């Protein structure tokens, strides 16, 4: 460091000698970019606020199996083990029921939203959540749903159901959520 | 260590005295220092007391933050030198200063100022640098950062990065704000506010645009936003997830991660969203977090094709990716150093996630931080510091560490959770 510093000092002196002094007294104030070395910083303009409010659509009342709390179709979350996208036995009936619904309602469309717990990189967790959502879609396709009915997306670790920092919370955040477009 | 502590005290005082409008939302705490600190005295400039923003406290704070300077108290020397002929080198030498900075402020017509400063070598008794600036009042802080950049460059040989900017995301309750601030945390400006998450902001190479991922359409979509007009555009909004934008060095293209064809894979798109994405990786695994080398030839990325997430490198023009990390079972978030000789990344050690640097030639790894959850590292444009996200008491904060691990800074936000930082480029 010291040696580099001295080298710089010398370089500075040499550079100083090379320039022609124009000021009357003392060493001149070198003016590499004459009279305007600080550009006027353009003001940063924020984006116009995006409207996120949506009008409320009145929900259908009556015999919608997707909304009936007694119907398995009202169950929408599939939970996963750490670093796994395998659908556990206990959740297979839920996936199968939605696959059957899709195969019987060809105009129905859904999104499967994959999620991850908070550990690790946000972007890698987007990819892990995506893989979980894809695992749900693949099982539904095997059971008769068509690929065009299901879009899989990922929220990564961004939308935790539980915000604590231990496994009692994390397991709830490693999940896939099913949302029908009609909802 | 002692002078540093004193200096921090004066730094706090300076922050307290700053006008409310200019006060930093992020305050900086310095931990540790460089091995060799250059002793330097910064003499308050003549007539700077009358300014809305004094210059020398900003210069002092910048240089101190780098950890490479030891501030010598300029108090008590009479007359206080502002011009070259007023310097008595013997006095400064007696105080142990190797360099002295003096300067003057002269008001000009039209609410402008003439700022002149000189950096003097006490040992050689000569001028190392001197500049005159004709500026408006709004440019006072930026001018102070530019002066600090000149001093830093002359005395360390590296480019100064005090006049650069950073971006990060603040979460307040359920609200997310994408902010841009000066590198010292001052002048924070919200460029996008949303009720849905915002992640992965990335600076365009010229510093005029940000690419980022927003969930406002209930899924991850990549946007590019102009900082000068505020105009924004979805540039990757394909079926599935769209994320992890990385700029090509020419600013014309973005590497992004799309799931439109199945697994999360890396594609190249035009930065204006035109055309068809060109697929760069071909695996059935996760390929994500792309990052370009500064010559635009190479890509680093994270992949779990080998069973665990590791860093890989590949040529942008194609060819088989090469695995680069072998220590540990979780290595993610790679970013090239500006000189392309190393890369920073996050390595998991037990339950901790820390910032590490790996030399591309020797493969030697150095872990630089010891937090429990360190994330999202990015190099300063001179390669000397790495900005990253950390956590203290369950709250997200920003921190920075020198690339040799010696100097550490913590930037805390008064309210809210801060994450996803990215250090902006040098701007002319």
Image (cartoon, helix red, strand yellow):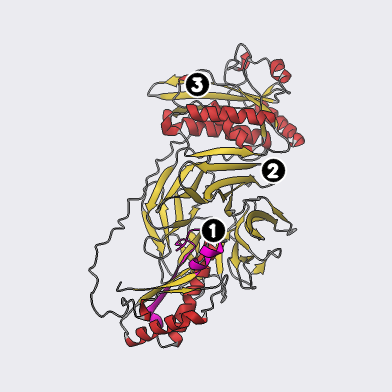
> For mark 1, does the 10 Å Cα neighbourhood hold few (<14), some (14 to 19), or many (20 or more) residues?
few
> What is the x, y in percent for residue B300?
61, 62
**Residue situated in front as seen by the camera: B358 or A123:** A123
Q: Is B124 rendered above or below residue B410?
A: above
- Mark 3 and mark 1 on one chain: no
Tell me, for residue A165, which label it has, or none: 1
Q: Is mark 3 on a helix, strand or loop?
A: helix
- Front-most of A142 and A24? A142
The C terminus of chain A appears in which quarter of the rendering?
Answer: bottom left
The residue that mark 3 highlights is: B48
Q: Is residue B427 above or below residue A151?
A: above
Residues at discs 2 and 3 both on one chain: yes
Q: Can residue B371 be seen in this view?
A: yes
Q: At which x and y percent is residue B61? A: 57, 32
Bounds of the magenta span?
A146-174
Query: Is residue B334 shown left or right of residue A153?
Result: right
Q: Cα distance, mark 1 to mark 2? A: 30 Å
Within 10 Å of the Cα at label 3, are there few (<14), some (14-19), or many (20+) other Cα atoms? some
- Residue at x-position 41% and y-position 69%: B238
Q: Residue furthest front?
A: A70
- If you read the primary sequence from the N terminus, does the residue marked by circle 2 or circle 3 appear first? 3
């Amino acid at each position: 460091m010291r040696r580099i510093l001295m080298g710089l000092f010398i370089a500075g002196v040499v550079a100083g000698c090379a320039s022609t002094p124009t000021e009357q007294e003392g060493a001149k104030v070198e003016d590499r970019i004459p009279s305007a070395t600080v550009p006027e910083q353009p003001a940063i303009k924020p984006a116009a606020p995006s409207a996120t409010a949506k009008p409320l659509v009145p929900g259908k009342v009556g015999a919608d199996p997707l909304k009936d709390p007694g119907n398995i179709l009202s169950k929408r979350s599939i939970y996963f083990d750490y670093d796994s996208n395998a659908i556990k036995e206990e959740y297979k009936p839920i996936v199968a029921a939605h696959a059957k619904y899709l195969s019987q309602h060809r105009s129905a469309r859904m999104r499967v939203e994959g999620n991850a717990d908070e550990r690790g990189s946000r972007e890698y967790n987007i990819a892990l959540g995506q893989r979980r959502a894809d695992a749900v879609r693949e099982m539904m396709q095997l059971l008769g749903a068509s690929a065009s009915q299901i879009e899989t997306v990922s929220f990564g670790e961004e939308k935790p159901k539980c915000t604590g920092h231990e496994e009692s919370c994390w397991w709830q955040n490693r999940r896939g959520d099913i949302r029908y477009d009609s909802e | 260590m002692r002078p540093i502590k004193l200096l921090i005290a004066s730094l706090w005082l300076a922050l307290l005295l700053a006008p409310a409008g200019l006060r930093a939302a992020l305050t900086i705490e310095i931990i540790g220092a460089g091995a060799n600190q250059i002793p330097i005295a910064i003499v308050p400039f003549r007539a700077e007391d009358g300014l809305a923003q004094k210059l020398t406290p900003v210069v002092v704070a910048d240089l101190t933050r780098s950890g490479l300077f030891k501030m010598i108290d300029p108090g008590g020397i009479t007359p206080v030198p502002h011009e070259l002929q007023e310097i008595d080198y013997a006095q400064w030498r007696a105080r142990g200063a190797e360099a002295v900075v003096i300067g003057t402020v002269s008001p000009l017509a039209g609410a402008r100022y003439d700022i002149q400063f000189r950096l003097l070598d006490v040992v050689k008794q000569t001028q190392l640098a001197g500049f005159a600036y004709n500026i408006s009042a709004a440019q006072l802080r930026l001018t102070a950062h530019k002066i600090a950049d000149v001093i830093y460059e002359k005395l360390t040989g590296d480019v100064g990065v005090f006049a650069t900017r950073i971006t990060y995301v603040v979460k307040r309750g359920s609200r997310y704000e994408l902010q841009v601030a000066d590198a010292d945390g001052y002048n924070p400006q919200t460029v996008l506010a949303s009720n849905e998450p915002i992640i992965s902001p990335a600076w365009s190479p010229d510093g005029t645009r940000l690419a980022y991922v927003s969930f406002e359409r209930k899924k991850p979509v990549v946007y590019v936003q102009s900082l000068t007009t505020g105009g924004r555009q979805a540039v990757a909004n394909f079926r599935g997830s769209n994320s992890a934008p990385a700029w090509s060095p020419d600013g014309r293209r973005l590497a992004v991660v799309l799931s439109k064809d199945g697994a999360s894979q890396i594609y190249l798109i035009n930065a204006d969203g035109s055309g068809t994405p060109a697929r760069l990786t071909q695996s059935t695994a996760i390929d994500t977090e792309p990052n370009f080398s500064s010559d635009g030839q190479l890509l680093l990325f994270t992949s779990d094709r080998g069973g665990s997430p590791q860093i890989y490198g590949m040529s942008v023009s194609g060819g088989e990716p090469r695995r680069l990390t072998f220590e540990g079972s979780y290595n993610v978030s790679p970013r090239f150093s500006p000189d392309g000789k190393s890369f920073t990344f996050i390595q998991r050690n037990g339950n901790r996630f820390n910032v590490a640097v790996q030399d591309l030639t020797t493969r030697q790894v150095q872990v630089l931080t010891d937090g429990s959850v360190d994330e999202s590292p990015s190099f300063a444009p001179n390669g000397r510091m790495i900005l990253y996200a950390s956590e203290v008491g369950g709250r997200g904060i920003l921190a920075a560490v020198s690339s040799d691990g010696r100097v550490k800074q913590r930037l805390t936000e008064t309210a809210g959770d801060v994450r996803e930082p990215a250090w902006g480029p040098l701007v002319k």
